[in-house]
Structures are given as structure tokens and as C-alpha cells.
Image (cartoon, rainbow, N blue to C red):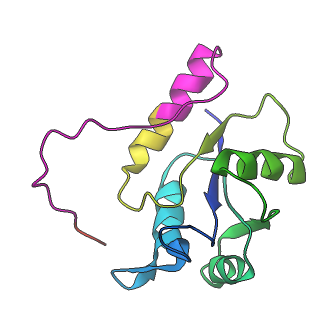
Amino acid sequence: MSFIVIIPARFSSSRLPGKPLIDIGGKPMIERVYGLAKQSKAKEVYVATDHKEIFDCCSSFGAKAVMTKPEHLTGTDRVAETTEILNLTSETVIVNLQGDEPFLNFNDIDNLAKFFIKEKRFDIGTLFSNFTDNKKSVCLP
């Protein structure tokens, strides 16, 4: 199973500017998300960002980061530009992992990639969760 994870991370969120850099348990959110992606079976993991501060932050913890245009309206647009920058082919399976998902189970990344590789009939998909218990706690490593 071969796939790539691209994490779109923009600075100018209307609700929380600089969200990828917000500290969660002593690490920037983007570092936590990248760490989850690296635990998956992805061949490569990239952060696609529009902002030098996020790019520099990613470089500081060893992430592969790609600078994209700031005018993208969605993370999907940012991922699409990154596929062009990296010269990826249409046969490459790409998991678009949202940059604000620091508590995702990395096995879900593998499961989504496995589904896409097996089914070969979908162009895009999104992970979701049905919350059944709002009292679950999250522990940070």
C-alpha cells in the first residue's frame, strides 16, 4: 500500500488566526498532526502552507513543507497546488489530512488510504466520526 499524506495548513483562519501554530500540550498543533501522519504507513508526508511562520515551524521539527499561494479558498485547493509542485501523477493516492486534527487516530489514515487503493472508484473522501460519548478524555503524548 503506497500513499502520500498532504496536510493543508493556512495561517489566516477567520475564527483563529495562526491556528496551526497554537500550542497544544507544549507542541504546535501542526507538529502534532504531522506526527500522527508520520505514524501512518504513508510513503511521504508534506505540510502545504501559505505562511512563512508555519513553513519555518515545520522545518524546525523536520517536516517536509511546501509553500503554496495564499489566495486558496480551501485546503483541497492547497493540496491540489501541492500535487502540481511535487509533480505527482493522477495514480498517486493522496490523503488530505486536515491541519487541525491533532487527536486523530493514525490508523484511520491507513484505513482511508487502503479503501481508496482497493476501491479505485472515488476521487476524494473525508474522514468523519459519529460522536457517541462527549465525556471521553484525550491524553497527549
Of 26 and 68, the residue lying toward us: 68
Q: Is residue 59 above or below residue 112?
A: below
Quarter holding the C terminus? Answer: bottom left
Residue at 41% over, 40% down: 108
Quarter holding the N terminus? Answer: top right
* 20 drawn magenta: no
Give the left or right position of residue 82, taking residue 64 as reference: right
Residue at 57% over, 18% down: 118
* 119 drawn magenta: yes
Which SS does the magenta portion mostly show?
Answer: loop
Residue interval drawn in magenta = 112-138
Horizontal and vertical percent position of residue 96: 60, 45
Q: Is residue 139 above or below residue 89?
A: below
Horizontal and vertical percent position of residue 132: 15, 38
Horizontal and vertical percent position of residue 107: 40, 43
Q: Is residue 24 above or below residue 33?
A: below
Image quarter of residue 120: top right
